[in-house]
Image (cartoon, rainbow, N blue to C red):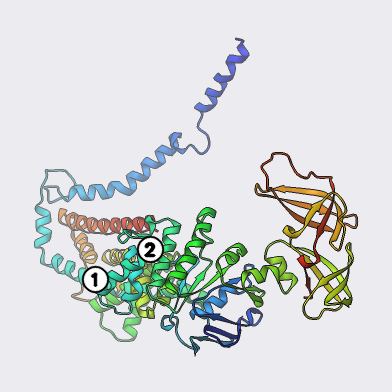
Amino acid sequence: MEKTDAIISVRNLTKRFGPKVVAVDDVSFDVQRGEFFALLGPSGCGKTTVLRLIAGFENPSEGNILLDGASVEGVDPNKRPVNMVFQNYAVFPHMTVAQNVGYGLKVAHVRKAEIGPKVAEALRLVRLEGYEERKPDQLSGGERQRVALARALIKKPKVLLLDEPLSALDAKLRVQMRQELVELQKSVGITFIIVTHDQNEALSMADRIAVMACGVVRQIAPPIELYEQPNSRFVADFIGRVNLFDGRVVGLEDGRVLIEAKGLGRIAVPHRGTAEGEVALAVRPEKVQLVSEEPRGSAIRLQGRVVDVAYYGDENLVGLRTEEALALTVNLPNVSRSTLPRVAVGDRLWATWAPEDCLLLTE
Amino acid sequence: MTDAALSVPRARRRRRDRATPLEYSRKGWMKLVMLMSFIFLYFPIVSLVAFSFNDSRRNIVWQGFTFKYYLKAYENAHLHEAFINSMIVSGTSTLVSTVLGTMLGIVLARYRFPLKGVYEGWVHLPIVIPEICMGVSLLAFFHLVDIPLGLFTITVSHIAFSAPFVALIVRARMAGFDRSLEEASRDLGASQWQTFFYVTLPYLVPGIVAGALLAFTLSLDDFVITFFTSGPGSTTFPIKIYSMVRFSVTPEVNAASTVLIVMTLTLTATAMILQARSRKRS
């Protein structure tokens, strides 16, 4: 990720609140022009602070931010060519929709005659035509969010910052808005940086995701890589579900690492790079097969008793426990229509997966 | 059906007949207290207004309806002058105390600084301090710095006691303000001044108007502090009424007082309606 076409370069950014709290700790990343970038992390991980630092509402304690190659140090938020969609939308309650959307142009002393058509265009973009004279208290949450979007986009920012934009919407609308936001981003061609704590949101929308925890960026990668190649136990565990097994590296064997894992015995796993000492073996629940007979060949296997079956409609989440008290979660998709349960609590089953489907985590 | 089955509803009915401890409206002595308070609080006002229409030089017996004392009060040059003085004092002090009080309210609602608690207590002192003490202290102060008593000193005193009230109301309004609105405004390119005038101030307007009306009412009918800080030729309306009463209580005094009551009531009602409306909106 060397100098390609970064619209935003965050360099060793640190933000301290008071002497004790480090909200953002030496964070660096680049966001490419036209990219949909997500900052993902549990609440309180500093992701919103990064966004506020980019917007200019906070000043960094250390490090700097380059916007389109130029440092924004000391530049007031109103002078930065970035705009923000706030978590609560912050739509001005005493102004109509048209006044809200046109606000950014009005304060820039754009002539009234020019503001009108631009407001109409922005409202068309977010599909709010005909809402010009409504007041915010006559709008639903989703409509208010569209107003906030139009109000920010009318300024034609270099980067649009979105702080948990979907968290205030109900579940159905949230899923719909994900797609709309992606389409909107593609159509306007503006770089989006979105902050979210919802991994599904980040995975389904973003081109690249930065996973943050405790003020530190743990991994930056496209969604697929993040899911299939997490670089640490934290990321593997935070993105989706994962089964983790503790193990020790005992040797190398033609490009594979030999591991002595608790409950799994000695297994060979493909791994790039070096590995030694204590490691973790990760496997996603959907990559595990449940069979009644002991599988043959090189497949990794584990025998256990079903202790828990959670029915989700499209799939079941089966909890397995081995005699050594190792716990394992397996996805069992309901591929055919049947009302008979496929597994029941108490069943003794074999869980098995290919060595290629599991991942060695050194951190 | 047995007797036992019948006796249950009867017992329940009897219990319902007795007033429970919190059913104030069903207690005789409570009603009496209420009636007495109404008589002592409001009858004087009602009779004052009624007798302003009494066609008699003495204010004791009802003689017939007339408007002539209103006309007489209107033609009374001294009363007229006092009324104009009152308008000047109230108008000026309202204007200044609204601006100062608004600024104070915003500061108190928004910023944290060392000794804020002390400062807060200090600026709200005029609300709790007895008026007589404030009057005496202001008089002593004006005497000390050698400012001649007159409309200026009255106005300054009125600003001093009404600004904290404005601050109190503005501050309460400010407490419900969403700071992200200001950030959104800044983010959209507005300067700090633009943000204040386009976003913060419009939000505060109902509070400011209510504060201003309260300040005007307080100033218009203030007697004690005005009495101490007024000088020769700077008589205000309440002071003039007082001096008229010292001669005799004529229907003319009643008429002048009624005018004052109506003005104060109108302003207070306006302030309350404005506040209620702004609360409903937010």
Give the chain letter at badge 2.
A
Snapshot quadrant of residue B159: bottom left
Q: Which mark is residue B91?
A: 1
Residue at 22 percent across and 55 percent down: it is B262
Residue A113 to residue A138: above or below: below
Secondary structure at badge 1 equals helix
Viewer-proximal residue among B212 and A216: A216
Q: Position of residue A331 (x, y in %)?
A: 73, 54
Residue type at tag 1: Gly
Image quadrant containing the C terminus of chain A: bottom right
Q: CA distance from mark 2 to mark 1?
A: 31 Å
Q: Residue furthest top?
A: B1
Residue B160 visible (yes or no): no
Identify the residue under disc 2: A93
Residue type at tag 2: Pro
Image quadrant containing the N terminus of chain A: bottom right
Snapshot quadrant of residue B240: bottom left
Q: Position of residue A117 (x, y in %)?
A: 28, 69
- Using residue B99 as the reference point, say whether residue B238 is left or right of it: left
Q: Position of residue B201 (x, y in %)?
A: 35, 71
Q: Nearer the viewer, mark 2 or mark 1?
A: 2
Viewer-proximal residue among A263 and A144: A263
